[in-house]
Amino acid sequence: MSDEADVIVVGAGLAGLVATYELARAGRRVLVLDQENRANLGGQAFWSLGGLFLVDSPEQRRNGIKDSYELALQDWLGSAGFDRDDEDHWARQWAQAYVRFAATEKRQYLHDLGLRFTPVVGWAERGGGVADGHGNSVPRFHLTWGTGPEVVRVFAEPVLDAERRGLVRFAFRHQVDELVVEDGAAVGVRGTVLEPSDVERGKASSRVAVDSFELRAKAVIVTSGGIGHNHDLIRTNWPVDRLGPCPETMIAGVPAHVDGRMLAISETAGATLVNRDRMWHYTEGLHNWDPIWPNHAIRIIPGPSSMWFDATGKRLPAPNFPGFDTNASMKAILSTGYDYSWFVLDQTILGREFVLSGSEQNPDITGKDIRKMLASRGGKGAPAPIEAFKNHGVDFVVARTVEELVAGMNKIARGPQLDAAQIERQIVARDREVANRFSKDLQLMAIANARRSWGDRLVRTTKPHRILDPAHGPLIAVRLNILTRKTLGGIQTTLDSQAVRADGTPFPGLYAAGEVAGFGGGGVHGYNALEGTFLGGCIFSGRAAGRALARTLG
């Protein structure tokens, strides 16, 4: 098997599939290793909502959204905040290249593979309130018709066809423990064969060893993902100076196999790791009432109307509104000394503005079922998965009065007991601002701006109304937990996805793509992400690695 491979790809997630797709197209022979079983082909991308960052797309233009490479790059650089000469050297170049890709050939590249998008463009990560700072100036979140499984499918199908033709071979349950380096070049891998496993996709699998292996090739591409389920590694690298104390309670937005093992293994072999303290976790995490993996978390992707309170019962300061500035909101929440916060809303806001992350939480779009989607999203109630969380989730409180609501919140609080009168005063103050078309409440002003977008007005943002109006009831409170997800730093790479050594020179034979490479360059996002950029980063960096090796291998 080792003699047949031109390239070994470590990791069968999206970045690995894209790199393998490009190599097989060029007639190269690829061996793909993964510590999980075949059921997990596509990795974390399968579980995603399938959002992709595009610039000046036909979908944007049909929505009346004016976008450009220049505006998108301004947003990207303002969000990234690159400030490290050495560690950000390649990341800055990746940022420019990726935004250009998103503004030019990215959509056609995916369209040619069969990927399609829903007509409404979402406005994610709206920012911190200044033009040259963090955030998207315009909606850019393009939702895949078919969500994450469809993104995986369009690359997996040609790769599986190449497997049938003998160009691609998979070795599942092969856990890499070491990169083989000879004469300064990566020439293979060594590791452990794990016992066979037939567990379903996403479930934690056995780590019992049954054999060992050594495999060789002309080059190795590491596409093994990040550290999202390795909470010990997250705690070690947590940026206390920027975000505040590391949360005591964290729930995992990714399966247990997202363990970050290949980062240290690659560093031991001589690759450079950069920006370890940059990571992307969410503040709107829910305990999954029907979990697949251990400590399974689901993120709320909120519209802008829920009132957001910290653990002490104080409304978060502007511009910490739902969906605006993830890291700023994280810092505000953790500054209280507690690791959770609260949304307070009503049934109307829940039905219109709550979307749950994950392909499995959006069966209508994942299944590409237009009738089901219209019935689910166009009805008066909330979609069934959201109602299920409201009815069964441990983080939800439903009540008719503020006093009853706060009593329920106090039962599940991990910190101070809240004062119902204090909460009600803040809701009433906000509700008074709805009585006329003027307001000094910046959140209401932001809602009005959001409703200028056709997509937000149609399906994502409720018309401003009094939260305490019984016609919109019942009242709902949601305890929000810190959900761990993405690694923004990693193996530093050139624009060809070739790993970089400590002296700044390219590492012969070693490439890295996807989250293990900070989605390109060791940190293309800098300190912040604009959303819809993670799948795209896997695609862009995997494509770069595959094409570079297809071009250069003898």
Image (cartoon, grey):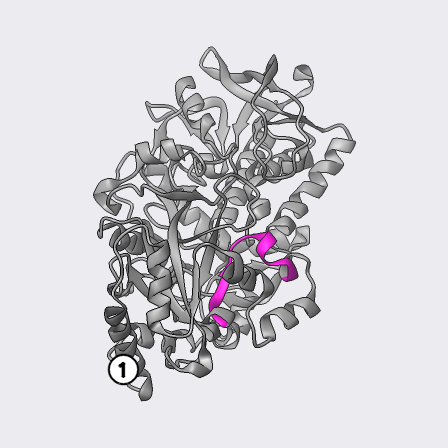
Percent of width and height locating residue 275: 32, 36
Which picture quadrant has residue 417? bottom left
Image quarter where the N terminus lies is top right
Percent of width and height locating residue 521: 41, 37
Can residue 414 be seen in the rendering of this structure? yes
Foreground: 421 or 361? Answer: 421
Q: Is residue 413 above or below residue 260?
A: below
Which residue matches tag 1?
Answer: 439
Q: Residue at x 61, y 31 (%)?
A: 550
Percent of width and height locating residue 273: 36, 29
Which picture quadrant has residue 398? bottom left
Can residue 282 be seen in the rendering of this structure? no
Q: Is residue 63 above or below residue 409?
A: below
| Dot 1 amino acid type | Ser
At numbered mark 1, what does the secondary structure look like: helix, strand or loop? loop
Percent of width and height locating residue 203: 59, 37
Foreground: 425 or 205? Answer: 425
Q: Which span is picked out in magenta?
A: 352-364
